[in-house]
Image (spheres, grey):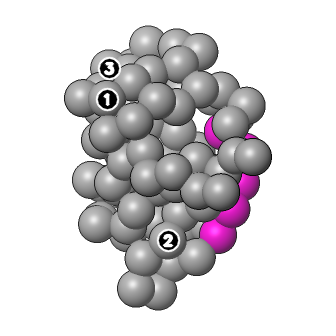
Amino acid sequence: MEQLVGKVTHYFGNIGVAAVQLTGPLAVGDQIHVKGHTTDFGQAVDSLEVEHQKVSQAGPGDDVAFKVTDKARTGDQVFRVGE
């Protein structure tokens, strides 16, 4: 089961980091699925940052950043994969 937890607002290609505005909870260790028109990949969240500070979890309304294993695009949806 997948739960929509946010949308990509920016992708920093030079460092492979996506900025995401959250609409749901997200924590380090969560499995996510990033999906868009030409984007479709899954990965684990290794670290989360809110305003350049490392955090272990974040919730709705937070703007977070984390490393991604593939290119993400503005507008891509981020889903948390769970049971």
x and y, in percent, of residue 17 in the image: 49, 48
In the image, taking residue 53 as reference, residue 70 lies left or right, namely right
Q: Nearer the viewer, residue 10 or 29?
A: 29
Q: Amino acid at mark 2?
A: Lys
Q: Amino acid at mark 3?
A: Glu
In the image, taking residue 71 as reference, residue 36 lies left or right, namely left
Query: Which quadrant does the N terminus fall into?
Result: bottom right
Residue that label 2 marks: 35
Instruction: Identify which residue is drawn at 40% across, 62% down.
Output: 77
Residue 13 visible in the displayed image: no
Secondary structure of the residue carrying numbered label 3: loop
**Cα gap from disc 2 to disc 3, whole angstroms:** 24 Å
- Between discs 1 and 3, the one toward the N terminus: 3
Establish if 77 lies above or below 53.
below
Name the disc covering residue 51, or none.
3
**Cα gap from disc 1 to disc 3, whole angstroms:** 15 Å
Q: Which residues are magenta?
A: 41-45
Q: Main secondary structure of the magenta part?
A: strand
Residue that label 1 marks: 60
Instruction: Identify which residue is drawn at 33% across, 54% down.
Output: 7
